[in-house]
Image (cartoon, rainbow, N blue to C red):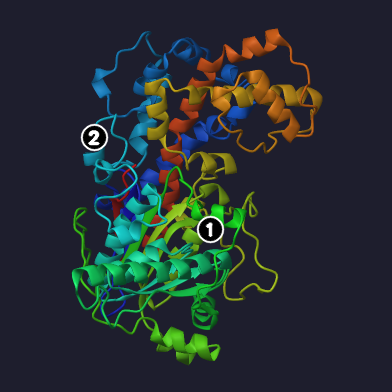
Amino acid sequence: MLVPMSVKDSTPSRTHQTGAPQNPQTRTQEQQRAHAKRLTWFLSQYSHLSDSFIIEFFTEDLWHTLPESWQSALNHLSYRQTAELLLDAAHGEERRYPLVWPLSLLAFRASAHALAFPRECKKQQGRASNSPKPDEFLENQSQSSLLGHAFRKHVKPKKQHEIRQLGTRVKQLCEQTGCSRVVDVGSGQGHLSRFLSFGLGLSVTAIEADRTLVTMATKFDGQLLLALEKECQKKKCSSLVPASQSPPRHVAGWVNPKASWKDFMKQLSTAECVKDHPQIPSGPSKKRLRGSEQDEYSDEVQTLSYPGSTRSESYSLDFDMTSQNECEDSSCCMHMQTLCQEGEHPDSNQLRGYPDFVLTGLHACGDLSATLLRHFVNCPHVHGITSVACCYMKITTKENPTPPGLVEQPALLTPSLDSPSSEFGYPMSSWVRGLPGHRLSYKAREGACHAIDDYIQRLREESELLRTHCYRAALEAFIRVKMPDLRRAGIQTIKKAHLLPFTEYARLGFARVGLPPGLPLDPERVEAMLKQQGRVVVYFSLVLLLAPVVETLVLLDRMIYLQENGELLQIRFLIVFSR
């Protein structure tokens, strides 16, 4: 995963890290803008691919929307050939083509790989294809060898890797900015907050909209403290936690993407603190919470900070560096805590004395990642930021200000008057906004969330999972016959669909859209569509090849936005997460 980065000193100057590929920090601002221009032109030429839905493969006859020369070249590719000739950028001259490919297809593939920021560091690129997990999971696939046992409880392997990697960067960023306080936005069950607080000695305020998750976070804090106490008793030491170190301060609150940084600061200071440890809810809710960490396909990690009075210094991070230093300043958010208890609304004078902090967020969804960047740019108290973004399809745009899945503003909140309603999640920069062809559809942004590596692995293994897209596309065709106005119905995932015969899959699918489960199917039509599974896989691979390109444009737009709002701001992209 890629990350841009910058840093802050005693006088405001900032640092930003962002998740992305290639080495964008070595380019000038003019080169970055030229890159954005090439990206928008390229994506506009192939928007018919990025905007298409694979479930409409049969209903829209997507195969025949490809140039005839492409159809001939791609028609009989094996799964392994699809992986190596189309998706895998590492093969290079080793490629062996069964047929001569048209120059337009070769140019498409080469351009997609060249324009996209790399999603893997060199170490990952050299990893064996049969070892998809980071080295820390070689001994035990469920437990990171680099993360303490107390921090692994309730945490899935992917999240273990993420909180260790991101937490280490946040700690390093705090050291570079001389700031010991962190605000974790969208903190969920508090896994990152706990590691930052108890593991790295930072003072942490965690804000989360879902009160149930906040309740779980406070409970898990208590469990971790007990675990550390037991371990301490075994080792006969006084304490494993510094006496001055307090648990994360958990705040239940929704961060309004349209609110100003002043509103955000007021929210931190006046929101209700959750201190007690209520009982875990019983029944399905408890089960859902324990496994609520979902695996996003692709993320963006961003880190920003201000180096010095000139705002021109920049620091690089050592990927393997791990800091366990204890925080010397134990007054984490004491000003915030006081205001929270008193229930006051700080005015401008009070905000001047507000403690400075580093802003972070793991998997900041949709507009939240853009909002954090705007707060970093505008708020004098934010000395650094790391933001791992996800769910690009939930980003608002001028063309689609309310995309599906957008979290609605709670009724009790009123829109901020300080933030113009014309601000959207994309594009953020004036430069990209002015480029012809810069628009990204909901579908294009949704596709940018997918990881090519996972699909390459399926292709090489000739996994039965590959038939799922063909099944869903065939089901869509039969649904349209009976319900012509129902397009792309939201059928929830059918468990182990790839192991079912299509007739059983269709029976379950029909029921979910209100059709009779026993609706008769034309056997010859079913067979004809299932025989085209290879074409479905190839077409999806063409679309998937554009995923990193779309993500690159989103990240580059944010990078240019930061440059537009900080002339001397130094930004670095770092690859942080292993796949």
In x, y percent, where is residue 200? 27, 68
Amino acid residing under circle 1: Asp
- Name which residue lies at 55% across and 47% down: 393
Residue bearing mark 2: 127
User: Is residue 56 or residue 139 the one in the foreground?
Assistant: 139
In x, y percent, where is residue 243? 27, 82
Between the C-alphas of marks 1 and 2, the distance is 34 Å
Residue 376 visible in the snapshot: no
In x, y percent, where is residue 247? 38, 75
Q: How many numbered circles are shown?
A: 2
Drawn side of residue 501 relative to residue 275, left or right = right
Q: Where, by quadrant of the figure, is residue 153 drawn? A: bottom left
User: Is residue 110 or residue 207 the one in the foreground?
Assistant: 207
Drawn side of residue 121 relative to residue 507, left or right = left
Residue 273 visible in the snapshot: yes
Q: Secondary structure at mark 2?
A: loop
In x, y percent, where is residue 442? 58, 43
Q: Secondary structure at mark 1?
A: helix
Q: Where, by quadrant of the figure, is residue 56 drawn? A: top right
Amino acid residing under circle 2: Arg
Drawn side of residue 565 relative to residue 232, left or right = right
Mark number displayed over residue 257? none
Residue bearing mark 1: 367
- Name which residue lies at 55% across and 88% down: 345
